[in-house]
Image (spheres, grey):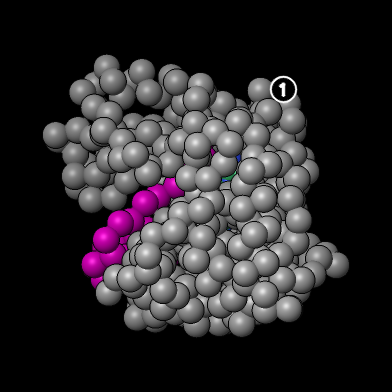
Amino acid sequence: MLNTQPSVSSLVDRHNRRFTYLRLSITDACNFRCSYCLPDGYCASAQDAPLSVEEIRLLVGAFAQNGTRKIRITGGEPTLRHDLAEIINVCKSTPGIETVTMTSNGYRLTKTLNSYIDAGLDSLNLSADSLQPETFKLITGHNKLEQVLNAIDLALDLGLTTVKVNAVLMREYNATEIGDFLEFVRNKPITLRLIELMQTGDNGDFYSAQHVSGIEIQQRLLKTGWLQVIRHPDAGPALEYTHPDYAGNIGLIMPYGQNFCDSCNRLRVASNGNIHNCLFNEANGNLRPFLIDGDTEKLGQYLRQVVLGKWQGHQLEQGFSGTTQHLAMLGG
Ligand code: SAM
Ligand code: SF4
């Protein structure tokens, strides 16, 4: 059911970009050890406790009053939180929020996805960096490809409107699997998104050795009959391609490509309440004090300021990847 609320949309930056999409990390903990993200596994830090359900309720309410219409729940691994169904329900029942989606590594989902859909989950992104069990294990540290593939099928069977699969491209791990990824969407109505590896504070050497440009793949797609889907004005930076012989689409996320930031429509909140107006920027501040006071009016004013401070583009080409050590801190 669509929640109705006047469209305020007051989060507009100096470059006329409108921020209607919140990526909300609900934990920085993870059960995987992806080579590009947490190669040594999750190590609990003295970071503040994750936002509580009540804090999330206030936070999402303030974002919605300022024009947010879509929320992606992410992590770390969001399914590690036992109150995830409640969090989904809080987001979905907030007036103004139209879509609640989630990014997950998929490993627990065959057991719990039903309850998340009952709570209001509309769509899902799952990560599968390889379709080869051995390579999947090498990348993630876990022999769980089968569970993730089952979760993809279950999400389709349960009728989620959109199911996307994320694969981060890495020269020595999965760059030879492009043909397999294309074949995977031949009969599956999903979008498989090939994501360029991004440099973070922790993965500099790995990035230098493994980064593959999406341009080569874009050229391959265009040469083999894939056509770029016309972008909705509110679509984010991913490019999407369709082909008459395939049930699914291919997405390309190329943060190092030109004009990547022009269509940015998202803000990010880390699990401790830090807000980031760019994935590759240090935190702009912490929202928790507003949540403790319950002052959503002041929080809205603060969000409008944070948006006005957003740079036109990231500085990745100059090697500046911000203070984010790895994307498990912020949710990608
Ligand atoms: N744990 C969940 C998962 O892996 O799907 C959600 C959090 S994860 C940080 C979100 C997405 O960011 C995943 O698709 C992951 O592959 C991607 N990601 C993490 N680190 C990345 C990096 N350095 N470059 C590109 N994508 C990255
Ligand atoms: Fe965990 Fe996701 Fe990072 Fe992999 S990419 S270590 S699953 S947070």
Picture residue at 34% right of the left edge, 72% below the top: 3
Residue 18: image location, x then y, percent: 48, 45
Picture residue at 74% right of the left edge, 39% below the top: 322
**Residue 192 sits in which quadrant?**
top left
- 224, 98: nearer the viewer: 98
**Residue 69 sits in which quadrant?**
bottom left
Q: Is residue 99 above or below residue 120?
A: above
Picture residue at 65% right of the left edge, 34% below the top: 311
Residue 139: image location, x then y, percent: 58, 47
> Is residue 167 inside the magenta stretch?
yes
* Residue 77 visible (yes or no): no
How many marks can you see? Answer: 1
User: The magenta stretch spans which residues?
Assistant: 147-169
Residue 111: image location, x then y, percent: 42, 78
- 32, 228: nearer the viewer: 228
Q: Amino acid at mark 1?
A: Gln
- 282, 30: nearer the viewer: 282
- 220, 150: nearer the viewer: 220
The answer to whether residue 204 is left or right of residue 161 is right
> Is residue 246 inside the magenta stretch?
no
Residue 4: image location, x then y, percent: 33, 71
* Residue 56 visible (yes or no): yes
Circle 1 residue: 318
**Residue 47 sits in which quadrant?**
bottom right
